[in-house]
C-alpha cells in the first residue's frame, strides 16, 4: 500500500514538472506589444513562431513587452532568446547582454513631423508654440524626433512647444490630430503615406534620415549552429506558407541579412556607446 502511495506521489510530481520543463525548453521571442493582449500578440506572430519552431525543432513562443524600457530590462536579464523590434532595442540589448542582429526588414525607418493641412503648419518654423504629440517617451521614433529637433536648432522642446503629449502608439498620434488635441504629430514617415492614402489631408513638415528597419536579434550565447539556423530560416521565410502568412499580415516583404555594424550610425544618433 505504501509503495502504491509512493508511486502515485512520484507520478503527480512528474506530471507537474512536465509543463514547466516544456516551457523551459521553449525559445522565447520578445516583441513590443503596445498594450495588445497576449492572445492578440500570439495570433499576430503565429505564422512566424510556427515557422521558427519547425526550423529549430523546438517550440518558439512570443511574449509582448508594453514598451521599449520593458523589453530592454528583460533583454538585459537574458529572458529572451530572440528579439524582433525597432533597431534601437537591438542596440541596447547588444550593449547590455550581447544580443546580435541577424536579419532585418528591407528598407529604412525615419521620423516624420506632420500636421493636418487645415492647421496651415507646413514648415519647421511653423511648429513653434504649437502642441506636439509623440509615441512613447522611450520609443525609437521619439528619440529620433528629438535628435532632429536639435538639428533644427530646437534645444529646449518643452519651451519651444506650447505642450508635449505622448501616446501609446502611432494610432494615438493620428487620433490626437483628428480630435484637435495636438497640432503636430510625430510618427514613422511611412505612416504619413499610409494615412494620406486613406484620405487624411496632411502636410509633411519635416522628415529625418533613414535608419535600419525592424530587426531580429538573437542572444550571443546561443550555440552558433542555432544562431545560423535562425538566420537561414529568416532569410528563407518567403518560401514557407506559415511565414508567408505572418509577412502578409504585417505587410513585410521578407528579411535581409543584418550585422552589428549596420547600426553604428544609429547608435551614434541615439548616443548609445
Image (cartoon, rainbow, N blue to C red):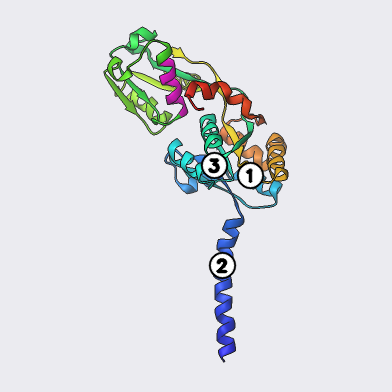
Query: Going by the image, does 176 lie left or right of 37?
Result: left
Query: Going by the image, does 164 lie left or right of 245?
Result: left
| Marks 3 and 2 close (CB-CB < 8 Å) | no
Mark closest to the chain's N terminus, 1 or 2: 2
Does residue 261 sit above or below 76 in this rendering? Answer: above
CA separation in Å, label 3 and label 1 = 28 Å
Report the magenta stretch's main SS. helix
Name which residue lies at 71% across and 40% down. 228
| Marks 3 and 1 close (CB-CB < 8 Å) | no
Please give the label number shown on residue 221: 1
Query: Going by the image, does 170 lie left or right of 211?
Result: left
Pinpoint residue 190: horizontal percent, then vertical percent.
51, 21
Q: Which residue is mark 2?
A: 17
- Point out the image quarter for the N terminus: bottom right
Does residue 74 sit above or below 120 in this rendering? Answer: below
In depth, the one of 46 and 212 nearer the eye is 212
Rate crowding at label 3 as few (under 14), some (14 to 19) or many (20 or more) other CA atoms within 10 Å: some
Mark closest to the chain's N terminus, 3 or 1: 3
Asked if one can make out residue 226 in the rendered structure from this viewpoint, the answer is yes
Pinpoint residue 45: horizontal percent, then vertical percent.
57, 42
Residues in magenta, as a range: 140-149
Does residue 53 sit above or below 123 in this rendering? Answer: below
Q: Secondary structure at mark 1?
A: loop
Q: Which residue is mark 3?
A: 44
Amino acid at each position: 500500500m505504501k509503495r502504491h502511495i509512493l508511486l502515485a506521489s512520484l507520478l503527480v510530481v512528474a506530471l507537474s514538472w512536465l509543463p514547466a520543463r516544456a516551457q523551459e525548453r521553449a525559445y522565447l521571442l520578445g516583441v513590443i506589444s503596445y498594450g495588445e493582449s497576449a492572445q492578440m500578440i500570439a495570433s499576430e506572430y503565429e505564422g512566424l513562431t510556427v515557422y521558427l519552431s519547425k526550423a529549430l525543432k523546438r517550440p518558439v513562443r512570443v511574449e509582448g513587452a508594453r514598451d521599449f524600457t520593458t523589453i530592454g530590462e528583460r533583454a538585459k536579464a537574458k529572458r529572451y532568446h530572440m528579439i524582433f523590434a525597432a533597431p534601437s532595442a537591438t542596440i541596447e540589448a547588444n550593449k547590455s547582454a550581447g544580443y546580435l542582429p541577424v536579419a532585418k526588414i528591407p528598407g529604412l525607418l525615419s521620423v516624420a513631423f506632420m500636421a493636418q493641412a487645415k492647421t496651415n503648419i507646413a514648415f519647421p518654423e511653423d511648429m513653434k508654440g504649437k502642441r506636439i504629440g509623440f509615441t512613447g517617451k522611450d520609443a525609437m521614433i521619439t528619440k529620433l524626433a528629438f535628435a532632429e529637433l536639435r538639428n533644427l536648432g530646437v534645444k529646449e522642446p518643452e519651451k519651444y512647444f506650447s505642450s508635449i503629449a505622448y501616446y501609446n502608439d502611432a494610432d494615438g498620434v493620428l487620433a490626437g490630430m483628428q480630435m484637435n488635441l495636438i497640432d503636430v504629430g510625430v510618427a514613422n514617415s511611412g505612416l504619413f503615406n499610409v494615412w494620406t492614402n486613406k484620405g487624411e489631408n496632411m502636410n509633411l513638415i519635416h522628415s529625418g534620415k533613414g535608419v535600419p528597419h525592424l530587426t531580429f536579434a538573437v542572444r550571443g550565447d546561443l550555440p552558433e549552429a542555432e544562431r545560423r539556423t535562425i538566420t537561414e530560416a529568416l532569410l528563407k521565410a518567403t518560401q514557407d506558407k506559415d511565414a508567408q502568412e505572418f509577412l502578409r499580415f504585417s505587410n513585410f516583404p521578407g528579411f535581409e541579412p543584418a550585422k552589428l555594424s549596420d547600426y553604428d550610425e544609429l547608435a551614434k544618433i541615439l548616443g548609445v556607446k
